[in-house]
Image (tube, grey):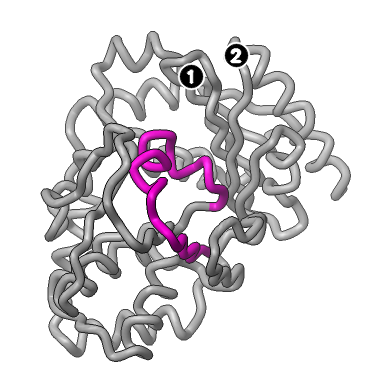
Amino acid sequence: MLGFALSMRLAGKEVVALSNDGVPWHLAFLPGADTIVKPDGQPLEIDVSVALDTATHDRLGANSIGALSKAGTLINIDHHGSNPGYGHLNYIDSHAPAVGEIVYDLLTAQGFPIDGAIRENLFTAISTDTGSFQYSSTTAHTHEIVAAMMRDGLDTARMARLLYSQNPMRRVELLRTLLNEMEFRADGRIASWMYPQTTRQRIGVQPGDTEGLIDTLRSIDSVVCAVIFEEQRDGGIRVSARSKNDTVNVADVCAQFGGGGHRAAAGATLPGPITTAATLYLEALEHEVRRTD
């Protein structure tokens, strides 16, 4: 979003960058992050709205949807195969590993400006969405984009340090809690963790602190699927699921509960309580895992 917005501003457009949840602490260093607006739901006087990396319209958030309600045209740019094409104009490439890659290709193909700030934002989008280039969806083209940005001055070592080596103590405490409480099933092939509001309050968790925690579960050698169940303030249970086996499609499992995403990374929201939601989801996931035996 920031990479796209900064380029449009350099091209002479008046742009408002909206994030329903605001900017998490771990991305506050990004150039232009201080210009992101957390909407209050009041309609803005705008002509065109662009939804980026948002698989369904409601994922924009109620306040953002309200803010964008007067836009005559909605452009939907995404890479989730489950995206229904909710925009007036839709560009959905389910083979692209990151929407940051799509945006880079769009900007370069159309001759829009790309400066150092834009490169830093697009690298962040690409790096985080590919698991630091570890996921199987990463292609040679992905690396070619980063190489091109490096030739134009992007310092990837600095960006990696800012993105992955700046953990506050509370996040380390959260990781310790995960390691103490994680559970296994399906002969160790499924690892899961329940993250209730009581844990959030005890540690003083801030938005962004849970980013990447699921990769700890996913990294265990026996694990095929990793799942985190996060209790929201409204009582809903946010499910984040990852698969590292092409035969296990977590998007299909999430779709059973009204969610979706990618084959290897998907999510859903279930009603609470958290233990009930976890039991229902894990039963469905274990069925999918054992089906591949």
Q: Which mark is residue 272?
A: 2
- Of residues 4 and 172, the one nearer the viewer is 4
Placement of 254 over or under 182, stated as above or below: below
- The range drawn in magenta is 55-78
What is the x, y in percent for residue 134?
47, 64
What is the x, y in percent for residue 198?
38, 9
Q: Is residue 141 magenta?
A: no
Placement of 196 over or under 122, stated as above or below: above
Tell me the residue at 39%/55% (across/down): 71
Mark 2 falls on what kind of element?
Answer: loop
**Quarter of the image holding residue 253?**
top right
Q: Amino acid at mark 2?
A: Gly
**Quarter of the image holding residue 206?**
top left
How far apart marks 1 and 2 lie (CA) works out to: 8 Å
According to the picture, the residue beneath numbered tag 1 turns out to be 231
Q: Amino acid at mark 1?
A: Glu
Q: Which mark is residue 249?
A: none
Mark 1 falls on what kind of element?
Answer: strand
- Of residues 268 and 13, the one nearer the viewer is 13
Quarter of the picture containing the N terminus is bottom left
Asked if one can make out residue 119 in the rendered structure from this viewpoint, the answer is no
- Of residues 27 and 171, the one nearer the viewer is 27
Describe residue 140's horizontal placement relative to residue 239 as left or right.
Answer: left
